[in-house]
Amino acid sequence: MCERIRTLSKDRPFEITIFGSSPIQLGLDSTFLSGDVDIFSDEDLSASIKKAGLAKGDAAIYIEQVPENVFIASPTWRQRAFSLVRDNVTLTFPHPIDILVAKIKRLAPKDLRAYHLVFQKTGHPTEAELKTALQRVVDIYRPAFDEEDNPGDPMENTRTVWRELYKKEIDVRAEIIRPALQARRSAYGLDLPSFRSQLNKLGN
């Protein structure tokens, strides 16, 4: 990847984020192979990807540029990310915890293997760490839009991760959803008695 960025124009800076399974392969285990490298960027890099011979259908391991909102992670994920500068290109790799959280909605077999790999190699995420990380993206547990294709079942997927990693069950509503929503209400000041009293007066 770092070698192929030389095909990019030198007349302006580029910022590219690499997510999915590739950062786990690069940072933890080179044998954890993936057929595609998922990236997003403010720039349309399709022409450069094609020129480098790394488009889908052109290479066994290809680069796929997707919209940033495909990467469903905490709003604070950039604070934990690792960045690497090569010439005029900044490559950003999200932290493993954010990569794992982004896999919860789909949790394909390869995604579950990623959970096992990270846990076996590092001992993380702990239960507390993963609960906190999932609370930051609590909205993934809301019902999917009718227009979504294969939206997945993040509630059941979370239970699966707990059984696989921690050998126990988890009450997703009690241990993740409710604490996250309670914290959100508190941050908005919606739990203040005076605020509730004012709302009651408005309703009467």
Image: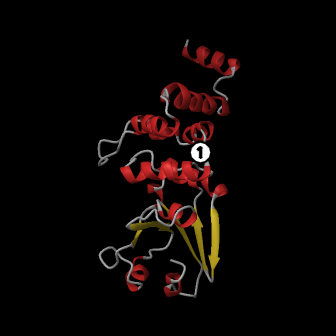
Q: Where is residue 74 in the image (x, y as percent from the top left)?
A: 57, 48
Residue at position x 44%, y 74% from top?
A: 44
Residue at position x 29%, y 75% from top?
A: 57
Quadrant of residue 63 within the rendered picture: bottom left
Which residue is disc 1 drawn over?
Answer: 125
In this rendering, is residue 4 above or below 27? Answer: below
In this rendering, is residue 198 above or below 130? Answer: above
Residue at position x 47%, y 65% from top?
A: 31
Badge 1 marks a residue whose secondary structure is loop
In this rendering, is residue 87 above or below 60? Answer: below
96 or 195, which lies in front?
96
The amino acid sitting under disc 1 is Pro
Q: Where is residue 53 in the image (x, y as percent from the top left)?
A: 38, 83
How was the colour assigned to the protein in this rendering?
A: secondary structure
Within 10 Å of the Cα at label 1, are there few (<14), some (14-19), or many (20+) other Cα atoms?
Answer: some
Q: Position of residue 194 (x, y in %)?
A: 70, 19
123 or 102, which lies in front?
123
